[in-house]
Image (tube, rainbow, N blue to C red):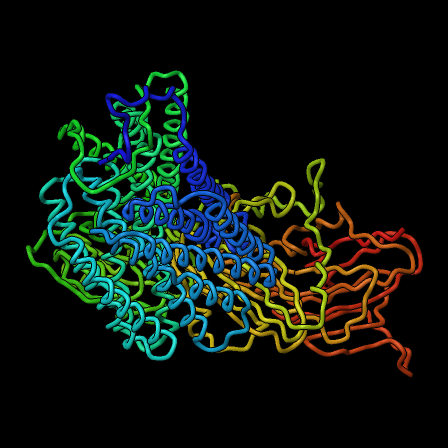
Amino acid sequence: MTTQLSSPTANGPAPKPPGRSPRALWHLGVNAVVVVWLGLFAVVGSAHHFLPHAFWLLVHTLLLGAVTNAVVIWSGHFAASVLRLPEANRGAPAALRLVCLNAGAVAVIGGMFTDRWPVVLVGGCLVAAAVTAHAVWLVRLLRRALPGRFSMTVRYYTAAALLPVGAALGVVMARGELGGDLPERLLLAHEMINLLGWVGLTVAGTLITLWPTMLRTRVADGAERAGRRALPVLLAGLGAAVAAALLGPPPLAAPGVVVHAAGLVIAGIPWVREARAKVPRSFAAWSVAAGSLWLAGALLFLAGTLLSTTSWITVGERTSLLTAPLAAGWIAQVLLGALGFLVPVVLGGGPTAVRAATAGLERAWPARLTVTNTALLLCVLPVPSVVRVICSVLLLVMLLYFLVLLVLTVVRGIRNRRKGTAGPAPAAEPVPAPGPAPAEAPARPHRVLGGVAFGLAVVMLAVAGGGAADVRSLPILERSAATSADGGEVTPTGRTTTVEVTVRNMRFSPASVDVPAGDRLVIELHNTGTDTHDLVLETGARTDRIAPGKRATLDAGVVGRDLDGWCSVVGHRQMGMVFGVRATGDGDGGTTSEGSEENGENGETAHDHGGTASEGTGESAADAFDPMAEPADGFTARDAQLPSAAEGSAPQVHRRTLTVKEAEAEVAPGVRQTLWTFDGTAPGPVLRGRVGDTFEITLVNDGTIGHSVDFHAGALAPDEPMRTIQPGESLTYRFKATRSGVWMYHCSTMPMSLHIANGMFGAVVIDPPGLPRVDREYLLVQSEFYLGEQNGTADADKVNAKEPDMVAFNGYASQYDHDPLTAKTGERVRIWVLTAGPNVPSAFHVVGGQFDTVFREGAYDLRPGGAERGGAQILDLAPASGGFVELTLPEAGDYPFVTHIMSDAERGAHGILRVR
C-alpha cells in the first residue's frame, strides 16, 4: 500500500499546483541510473558475440551495475521510511556515494574489458568505499531513530554490507596467476558473499514489509520476530559456507548452504501465510514469488553439487549452470517486480494516478511472466543450441519490453502531473508502508489464464521453430523394417526382442544383434562415452541425441531383414560408430534391398545430415573450385600482420573468450563452406605473448554439436580443460607459457581430423626471449580443405582418405595473390608459419628470397653471422609444427611464397610478397 507522511488538513493551505516534490525528483533521478544499467545489460546481451569477456560483462552489468545501485538506493529509501526519517536518504552525501559507486562499477567493467588490472583495482576500491560509507550511514541512522517495529529491516541492510569482501576477492581473481583449484574456490566464495550476502540479505530484509504491501494485506503476526530469528542463522550459514570454500573440501561447504537455506525458510514462513491470506494478483508479487522459487532451486542444486564431489574444479564447472537461475531467475525478477511496484508509488499523483501507472507497467503481465520463466527453464535444460538461443532472445525481449513500459509510464506520469490531470498533488510523496492498501480491482481469472496460455504458446512456437532450424531434427526417409530381403512383408510373430546396447569409446557394444524375423525390436541405448551420440537405423527409426551418461529407447518395429545403423553425429560414422541388425530364421535376407545399402532410397548419404548449422546445396564445392579464378571486386585478404606482444618485462595475464560458431564462409572464389570456427573465423584469433605469460581462455560452445580446445602452448593434464563441452556450455582453460614457439590450438573432439579440417584451429605465438624487432612481421597458417557440398561441411571420407581438394594460407586459397603482403626494399621481414593440417606438411619457400634466420619448433636452425655464411631455402614443417624465417629482399618486385610441395601450391597454398 502507500501511506502519506503528511497531508493538508481542512483548515490548512490549499494543495500545491501539480509538479514533482524534491523527494520524487530524487527517486526518479537515482532510479534512472538503474534503468540505464539495465539498458546496458540489454545492449551487451544483444552484442555479446562481438565483445571480449561477454559472459562476465553480462553478469556484472546486471549485478554490479543495475542490482548494486538498486540495493543502495532502495535500502536507503526503506531504512529512512521504517525509521521515520524520510529526509535522511537524499542530499549531497547520498549523491556522492552513488557517484563513487558508479565510477567504481564503470572502472571495474572497463578495466576487465580492456584487460587493465590496475583500473579494475581502482574500481574495486571505489565500489568498496561506496558500500562501506552506505553501511556506516545506515548504522548512524539506526542510532538516531527511535525504536520501531520494523527496524529489523535496517539490521538486515547493515549485515548485508559484505560487498567489499566480495569485491576484494573479485579483484584478486582479475589479477590472475592463481594455481591449482584456488580460482574455483575464490569464485564460489565471491559469488556466495555477493549474491547470498549483499543481494540476498537485502532482499530478505526488504520483503518483511514490502511483500505484504505488494499483496495489499497486513504484515503477518510474528513476521518481525521471524526476521529477527532468521538473521543470525543466515549469517552463520553464509560464513560457514564461505570459510569451507576457502579452506576445506566441497562437502564441508554444503552444511553452510543448508543452514543459510534454513534461515530463509524461517524468514519466509510469514510470507507464505501472507500469500495464503491474500493471493498474489499483480506482476510485482508474482515476479518476486517466481524469483524466490528460482533461488530455492539454485540453493538445492548448490548443496547437492557440493556433497557429490571432492573436486573444487568440478564444483566450478557445475555451479556455472547456476548463473542463469540466480541472475535472471531470482535477482532480475525480484528487481523488476520491485520496480514495477515502487515506481508508480514514487510517481505519486494520487490513487488514480498510481493505479494508472501500475496498470501501464502490468500490461500483459501473465504472458510476460510465463514467457520469462518457461524460456529460462528451457535455457537450463539440455535442449538443442538453437532452442536455447531463441529462448535467450525471448528473455532479452521481455526485459526490453519492461524497460519500454517503464519509460513510457514515467514520461506519461510526469506529463499528466504537469497538465494537472492526475488530481491534486499530495503535500509529500507516498512511501510504501506495511498495512492494508485500498482495494484494487482483482485480475480476472480468465484473463490471467489466457495470458499464461499465450505465453506458453509463444515459447512452444519458439521451441518448434528452433527444432525445425536445428538440422539434427531433420528426418531420414523411412522404410519399413518388416520388408524382407525379397521385398515381401514378413509375418509378425507378436514377440518383442529387447536388447541393451552401450556406447563405449566411439563404438556400439555389441556392434550387431540377432533378431528372429518377425519379432519387434526394441533397443535400449546407454551412452557411457564422453560425447553426445545417437543411433539411427536405415529405416529412419532413431533416438534423440543423448548426452554422456544418459539413456534412450529406439523402437525399430517388426524386423524382416538385415538393417544398418550408425551414429549420425558428423564424422562419428566414419570413425566406426556403425551398428547392425541381423534378421534370423525365415526372414533372414542377409542383405539390404537395392539402393539402400549406404544411402537412403533417394541416394542421399544419411550421415551428412547431422551436426551442422547449414545443409549443403547438393552441388559439389570441389567442382566449383578453380585455382585460377579471381575473387569479386573489392576483395580484401585476411590481415596476416602479426599483432605485437604487450610491452613490459613483467609477465602478463591474457584473458580471452573463444566462442564456437558455425559460419558460412567463402574459402576460394565461388566456393563456400559451413565452417566450425573459434570466434567466427578459420583460422581462429591469433594469441601472442612472452615466456612466463599466463593465458586464461573461456571457451563457449554456441555450435550444434560438442567441441573442445587443446592449446599446445601449455603443459597440463588434458582430462578437464580439453574435455568436450556440449552446445550452450562453457569452460575455462588456464595455462602458463613456459616455452617459446608458434603453437597450434585446435578442437580435440573426435573425430579430431574432421574438426580441424572444418576450421577449428588457430595459432599462439610465444616470443623467444630477446627476439629482435623487425620491420615487418607476418603470420601464415597453412591448412587443407576437404570440400563437401557447396555451403556444406568438410567431406569426412576425403579426410579419412587424406585427399584434399585445396590447400590455403590463412583460410582462403591464393588470397595473397589477389591482395599481396607488402614490404619495402631493404626491410627485414619475419614470417611465422604454422602448419595446422590436419594431414599435409609444408615446405615454406619464398621465390627469389633466401632465409638468413630459421627458427623451428622452439630452436634456431640458422642465425646470421655464422662462419659458414649459410642460408636456407625452405622451412619444412610437419602438421601441427611451426616456426619463423627472416629475410631481406634487396630489389623491388613481386616475390611469390609457396609450399614447395608443389601440388599443394597449385591447390591454393600460394601468395605474393610485394616489395617496393
Q: Is residue 141 visible?
A: yes
Coordinates of residue 342 in the picture (x, y in percent): 31, 37
x 32%, y 43%: residue: 467
Asked whether, in this view, residue 592 is left or right of residue 877, the answer is left
Q: Is residue 797 above or below residue 41?
A: below
Coordinates of residue 3 in the picture (x, y in percent): 24, 35
Which of the 4 image quarters holds residue 581? bottom left
Of the pair 710 and 669, the residue shown nearer to us: 710
Q: Looking at this rendering, what residue extends furthest in the left direction?
A: 494
Coordinates of residue 762 in the picture (x, y in percent): 59, 61
x 91%, y 60%: residue: 826
Of the pair 102 and 384, the residue shown nearer to us: 102
Of the pair 532 and 428, the residue shown nearer to us: 428
Quadrant where the N terminus sits is top left
Asked whether, in this view, residue 820 is left or right of residue 481, the answer is right
Q: Looking at this rendering, what residue extends furthest in the bottom direction?
A: 867
Q: Looking at this rendering, what residue extends furthest in the right direction?
A: 891
